[in-house]
Amino acid sequence: GGGETSESFKTQKGIIDLMNNLPEFEFVFADAPLNNVWIQDPPGGKGEPTTDPNWAEGSITYLDNLIAQEGPFFGILGYSQGAAFIPVYLANTSNEFDIALMSNGYLPTTHQGLIGSINSAGPFSTPAVVFSGENDTGFKDMAQDLADTFTNSVDIRSSVAGHHLPHANDPTFTQIKNFISTNSVGATINDGLVIQLTGNLTFHEDSTDRKS
């Protein structure tokens, strides 16, 4: 999420469990290019939203370059602010993904220029999962607005999770794992899944392991 590094994100139990249960995928982690956040805070504070549609241009360019160098990717996954950044990125790139996974996210409503770009480009047809935790009191109620930016979204609410990806013993974990595996069957992109760094990471499916 915002302020986190890719190295710290790699140590989250939910990410470790996901990687251990998807050995056919290579996970590629990204780092936000400035201040460890994908979207910089409004200069006047959250009570004064930004209006610049290019407010996140540095992060968008960074991911475009990463994908050009290491992609294509099967999917994109974001956590917290990383999840909030996914619709921003989809609205401002020509890159496409077979799936999008968003955990503990929200819409970046303190950036009205970015919201405008999302509204203009969306709703997005990318098959998506929007995950939230019942114990994530500060974020769970914002999941629906994020899900509404997609026409084909699976909304998953864990009864036990807080502000973190589901662990392997979470009843919802298998749903997410199956969503990824099912959508990878017959997919045309050989290389992978973008996960989010902190909030963003990317993961590749290993083309040597993948069967068409």
Image (tube, rainbow, N blue to C red):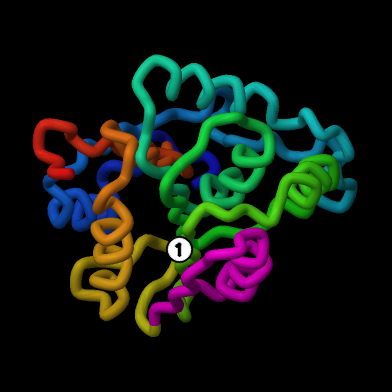
Which quadrant of the rendered structure holds the C terminus?
Answer: top left
Q: Is residue 122 visible?
A: yes
Q: Amino acid at mark 1?
A: Val
Q: Is residue 150 magenta?
A: yes
What residue do we see at 59% from left, 35% from top?
Answer: 38
Report the residue marked by disc 1.
129
Q: Would you say 97 lies left or right of 166 here?
A: right
Q: Would you say 117 lies left or right of 92 here?
A: right
Q: Would you say 179 lies left or right of 168 here?
A: right
What residue do we see at 55% from left, 59% from top?
Answer: 105
Front-most of 139 and 52?
52
What residue do we see at 23% from left, 55% from top?
Answer: 18
Front-most of 199 and 187?
187
What residue do we see at 43% from left, 51% from top?
Answer: 99
Give coordinates of residue 185: x percent, y percent: 25, 53
Q: Is residue 8 visible?
A: no
